[in-house]
Amino acid sequence: MFRKCYGCHSIEPGGAAQNGPNLHGIVGRRIASEPEFDYSPAMEAFARREEVWTAELLARFVADPEALVPGTDMFVPPVTDPEERAALIDFLKADRGN
């Protein structure tokens, strides 16, 4: 499932930001906190309302990014399939020993 994200996001520890922020350790991380990424005003405003990316909040975001963060710069089709969303979130939560 992450292959759909890989064009814009890295997941390697310390990996550089691309068109999107590095997602290594995203679950439990402060929203809009990747230091090497320039977040949209919409995401920065969202970060002031919601503090941390939980698994549940990430699932809501990938289900419909524009609905959760109106004005977001993330232009991808929503992940509408609940099983695909769950697999993606599990992948992002996994400790890869890195």
Image (tube, grey):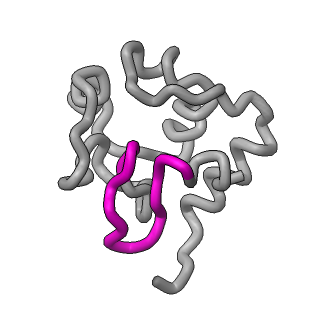
Q: Is residue 18 magenta?
A: yes
- The residue positioned 51% from the left and 85% from the top of the image is 97
Q: Can you give x and y, in whole percent of width and height, for residue 88 in the image? A: 66, 51
Viewer-proximal residue, 39 or 55? 39
Q: Quick check: 44 above or below 58?
A: above
Q: Can you give x and y, in whole percent of width and height, for residue 36 in the image? A: 21, 54
Viewer-proximal residue, 45 or 28? 45
**Residue 27 seen by the camera:** no
- The residue positioned 56% from the left and 59% from the top of the image is 92
Q: Can you give x and y, in whole percent of width and height, for residue 68 in the image? A: 47, 21
Q: Quick check: 87 above or below 47?
A: below
The quarter holding residue 47 reads top left
The quarter holding residue 3 reads bottom right
Q: Is residue 1 magenta?
A: no
- The residue positioned 22% from the left and 23% from the top of the image is 41
- The residue positioned 51% from the left and 26% from the top of the image is 75
Which SS does the magenta portion mostly show? loop
**Residue 56 seen by the camera:** yes
Left or right: 81 in relation to 57: right
Please give the count of numbered marks on the rendered protein: 0
Q: Quick check: 43 above or below 21?
A: above
Task: Write down the region rendered in magenta.
Answer: 7-21
Left or right: 68 in relation to 16: right
Q: Can you give x and y, in whole percent of width and height, for residue 17 in the image? A: 33, 55
Q: Quick check: 7 above or below 67?
A: below
